[in-house]
Each structure stands twice: as structure tokens, then as C-alpha cells.
Image (tube, grey):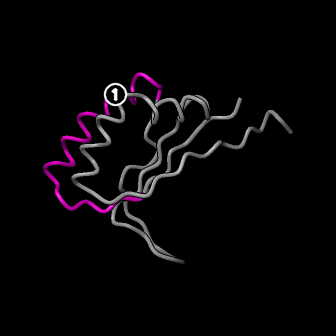
Amino acid sequence: MAKGYWIAHVDVQDAEQYRNYIEANAAPFKAFGARFLVRNGDCQCREGAVRERQVVLEFPTYQSAIDCYDSQEYQKARKLRNDAAWADLVIVEGYDHDQE
């Protein structure tokens, strides 16, 4: 079964409020098995536009990635982020090598 990924690009306007979002998202991320692969490291934009922060989370399955986003607990955290930052977020199904 293919893993699921959140790929987010974020511009933070209120760092203190954004820290509240980070604290609030920890519980749903843990509950749905999320693991950070990228969390705002150095980056180079080679094409197009980019926001200041890049984040990639891996979930055990594509469905768990969707379920985490849709969960009440994450939606509460998301409201904190909406007051602190602009974000673009996609949920992507990973490539399943076992299906070849």
C-alpha cells in the first residue's frame, strides 16, 4: 500500500501564533503516524515561486494522510495556522514500488 504525503509551502506572518499551531498539530500528527521528512531546511528555488518554509510529512498510507487533515483535532490546529500564516498544502499518494 502506498504511503501518503503532505507537501506544504508556508509564509509565516505571526511567529508566536505559528508556534501555537505547531504545538496543536503534534497530537493529530502522532495519532495518524506522521513523520517529518522536511521541516524548513535550506532550499533553492530553481523554477517558479516558493514560500519561505517547506514541509513534507510522510504518513503510513494515503488514506491516513487524508484522515489526519480531515480530523477534528487537526482542523482545530489549522485554524491557529490560518491566523498566523499563508499556506499551500497538497496531499499526495506516494509511489508504490510493490505495484510494479
- Residue in front for this viewpoint, 82 or 17: 82
Image x and y of residue 41, in percent: 37, 57
Q: Quadrant of residue 93?
A: top right
Q: Secondary structure at mark 1?
A: helix
- 19 shown above or below 40: above
What is the magenta segment's predominant secondary structure?
A: helix
In the image: residue 60, left or right of residue 98: left
17 falls in the magenta region: yes
Q: Which quarter of the figure is the N terminus placed in?
A: top right
Q: Residue at x 42, y 51 (%)?
A: 55
| Furthest-left residue in this view | 16
Q: Residue at x 43, y 40 (%)?
A: 36
- Residue in front for this viewpoint, 10 or 70: 70
Q: Residue at x 35, y 36 (%)?
A: 75
Image x and y of residue 82, in percent: 28, 51
- 67 shown above or below 47: above
Task: Specify the amino acid type for callout 1.
Answer: Glu
| Furthest-top residue in this view | 31
28 falls in the magenta region: yes
Q: Which quarter of the figure is the C terminus placed in?
A: top right
In the image: residue 15, left or right of residue 75: left
The total number of labels drawn is: 1
**How would you rate the neighbour count of disc 1 (Cα within 10 Å): few for under 14, some for 14-19, many for 20 or more?**
some
Image x and y of residue 13, in percent: 21, 62
Image x and y of residue 94, in percent: 66, 42
Q: What span is colored magenta in the figure?
A: 9-33
- 82 shown above or below 73: below
Q: Residue at x 52, y 51 (%)?
A: 90
- 82 shown above or below 58: below
* Residue at image mark 1: 73
